[in-house]
Structure formats: C-alpha cells, structure tokens
Image (cartoon, grey):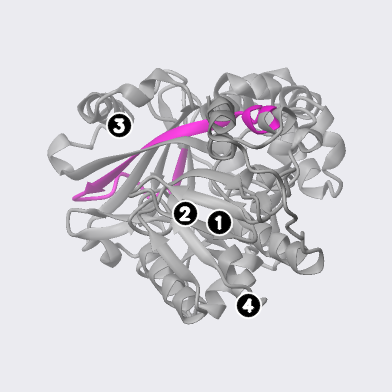
Amino acid sequence: MTLALRLAEQGKSVTLFEAAPSFGGLASAWRLGDVVWDRHYHVTLASDSHLRYLLRELGLEGDMQWSKSRTGFYVDSQLYSMSNAVEFLKFPPLGLGDKMRLAATILRASRIKDWKPLEKIRVKDWLEKWSGPRVTEKIWVPLLRAKLGENYHDTSAAFIWATIARMYAARRTGMKTEQFGYVPGGYARIIERFEQVLRQKQVKCSLGQPVKTIASTNSGTVRIETGNGGVVETFDHVVVTTASPLAARMCPELTTTERNLLNGIRYQGIICASLLLKKPLSDFYITNITDGRMPFTAVIEMSAIVDRGQFGGRALVYLPKYLPSDSADFDLTDDEIKEKFLAALEQMHPQFKWDDLLCFQISRVKYLLPIPTLNYSDNLPAISTSVPGLHIMNSAHIVNGTLNVNETVQLAESTARKFARQPVVAVPVRKLTDHELAEATR
C-alpha cells in the first residue's frame, strides 16, 4: 500500500491487486466476538519514524496512545519479571557474573553500527563469545529456538543485532523507559484510512483478486492473470510483493538462477491464537518462554499496553508459535490447537480458568519471517528481474532490520525512490508459447 501511494504520487497510474477481500495482509484486522482488532500483534516504537510519518500523512499520528511496558520470563516453570534494572539484578535463573555478561552483550550489540560483518558469523557463536556458554544455553538459545526453530543454527549474528538495535533505538530518542504506541481502533482503522487515501490518489484497488500468472507480452508489457474469473490486464511495470516462494510460482519466465534464489530464502511461519478473556492474565506485555515443551513460544498480552476500553473492558492475549513453513502443525485442527494452548496457559497461569475465555481464533501464515542466514544479503535476488518490467520486492529485502511494519514501510519508500530515479524501461520480448508457459510453470 505504501509503494502504491508513492508511485501514484510520482504521477504513475497504479492498480493494487489483493487476494484477500480486504487490505492489510499481516497487518489486517478481524472480529473477535464484538471486538475488532489486529489479527497479529503489532506495536509502534517512538523511533519508528517511517511508520509515524505515514500515520501523520494519514491524519492518525496525533491520536496515538503511549504506554510503558513490562516484560516477563517463564523459566524452569516459574514466572519472573524482568522489567527494570533492579529486577534484572534479582533475576534468579542467572548468577551475577552471568547477568553482567548478558548486559554486556546487549550493550555491545546496541553500539554496533556496521552490521554487514555480522552476516558472516553464526548467531550462537557470537552470543557465546560475549555472553558465555551458560547464558547462551540458558537464555539465548531457547529464545532463538522459539522464534527460528532449528534454523537458528544457520542464522547470522545480524539477527540478534537487528532485534536489540530496534529496542534500543527508542531510548536514543530520549525515552528512559520502553514505551509502545498504538492507534485507537488498531490497524482496522489505519488500513481503512489508508485505502481511502489510495482511492483519493486515483489508485485502482482490486480486492479479492489473487494473481495466478505474470508473464511478458510481445508488445513489451507485462500481463497479469488473476485466479478469480480469469481477469487479464497488462501494465508497463509490475511489482510483486508476495513472499518469495509465491512470487517464484507466479512468474514462470524467471531464469533458473532467479527462481533458485527466491526459493532458497528460508521462512518461518506462524500459528497465532487470539484470545479474548474476561480478565487479564498479568501486567506483562510480553512473557518470553524458555521452556521448549510449551506449545506456544510467548504470551503477548495486548491489553497490558492498550486501554482495555478498546476491548470492551476485556483482555486480549496472543499466543504465537513460530515454526517452519512446511511444518505438519499447520494441518492441526483449531480444536487440537486450542486444547494444547489452553492447557499450557493454565499451567503458566494457575488463576486462568477455561470459562474466562470469551473467544479463541487462530491465524495461520506459512511464509511470515525470512530467516537471515549466513551471508544473507549476498544471496538475495535483485528487485528488478530479467523479465523487462517485472520487479519482485518483499520483506526478504529487509537486510538490516527485523520484520515489523516500520521496516516494511521504509523498504517500500526506498524502493519507490529507486523507481523514480532509475525507471526500468520495458522493451519488447518474445512471448512464451502455451507449451513453454506450461513447462515453466510445472
């Protein structure tokens, strides 16, 4: 949506195709009983300048609410608070020496300016160097495994640098404590306003139109065929913003090298449960879980930072489980997931009762998080492809940050500027025959 807006502002005629019936993707909203809120958990930091500027353009930044957050850790079946320096020093699972090394690791990461050399170092090796083996195994590895699964073995140290750098960026803005912001009404309100602005800018919004095939034509344009009703349109340029494996399937004319690079990007998926509860579980926004036996990898209590009036006085909790995009867990039924998640939640929070649950809904996303493997940025496919007029740009191109809305907006902004400075001219190419197209798609 940001890319479409900026291209329209450059004077281009833009059509935005969306497979779903509404815009937003990972930032979309849904209904939980009588509450409408984000399908996945999102917060804004004071340092998220690109997102905040966009919200200002949409007339929403002035409405933002800010809250201090607290952090919990679930270690060895015990729940601890680690929300300030005093609690950090008292944190029982680690000795004083371990805490000093952990603090030194975070401080070291926050001061690194050049992230590129970190891409050549495995994250576990880097953490062991600075935190030591005990802290790495007790704290870091469980957290890495919770987010990345066994892919953490091949993940570079740039991942932990980007994670720490984002959280510390807010402190560089002058805030002494960690504060998270949100727009009342959540992303449902943001996306609704954004769509209004796009239509005002004469962007054609084509909803409920999953793209099936993108191919070149004899006249040098790019042809899009959608899956619903077989709608066919042609354009001078097409920018694909779906996950890399999906983009590879849509574009049969890509070279073997381009296809291999796109399919070579590893993804973590997510099963994320949203729970609407009668009352809160705790005052922690996030509870990090180091116990790998738990069926979810964290507890995110959105109502710990969002005014509960947004939820009709109830509490909103997310239970995410990050897992490989080909995991068999995606085939579990909603009831199977619900039974496992609620039993584990009761173990963590004995005061939780099943009749406290008002609504339980599950979101499944197979291609969520591109994993920054060793030498990641050196193996990324270029945004402009070998097919004239065809470009592929998605969250895999975030090379020096973490996956969040601010980074996504920044990527779209920078890509739009590149298109403005260096327009790629479409030239006539031979159109594939039906047989060649079928072979390429196979």
Query: For the residues carrying marks 1 and 3, which lies nearer the camera in this image?
Result: 1
Instruction: Please indicate, yes or no, whether residue 125 appears anywhere in the rendered image.
Output: yes
Q: For mark 1, does the 10 Å Cα neighbourhood hold few (<14), some (14 to 19), or many (20 or more) residues? A: some
Q: Which disc, if any, is residue 9?
A: 4
Q: Which residues are magenta?
A: 260-287
Q: For mark 4, does the 10 Å Cα neighbourhood hold few (<14), some (14 to 19), or many (20 or more) residues? A: some
Q: Does label 3 or label 4 sit earlier along the sequence?
A: 4
Contact between marks 1 and 2 (CB within 8 A): the answer is yes
Q: Is residue 276 magenta?
A: yes
Q: For mark 3, does the 10 Å Cα neighbourhood hold few (<14), some (14 to 19), or many (20 or more) residues? A: many
Callout 4 amino acid: Glu
Q: Position of residue 134 (x, y in %)?
A: 68, 19
Q: Is residue 189 magenta?
A: no
Callout 1 amino acid: Val
Callout 3 amino acid: Leu
Q: Does label 2 or label 4 sit earlier along the sequence?
A: 4
| Label 1, label 2: how far apart the Cα atoms are | 8 Å
- Image side of residue 81 versus residue 108, left or right: left
| Residue linked to disc 3 | 345
Query: For the residues carrying marks 3 and 4, which lies nearer the camera in this image?
Result: 4
Q: Does label 3 or label 2 sit earlier along the sequence?
A: 2
| Residue linked to disc 2 | 42
| Label 4, label 1: how far apart the Cα atoms are | 21 Å
| Residue linked to disc 1 | 405
In the rendered image of this protein, does residue 418 appear above or below residue 399?
Answer: below
| Label 3, label 4: how far apart the Cα atoms are | 48 Å
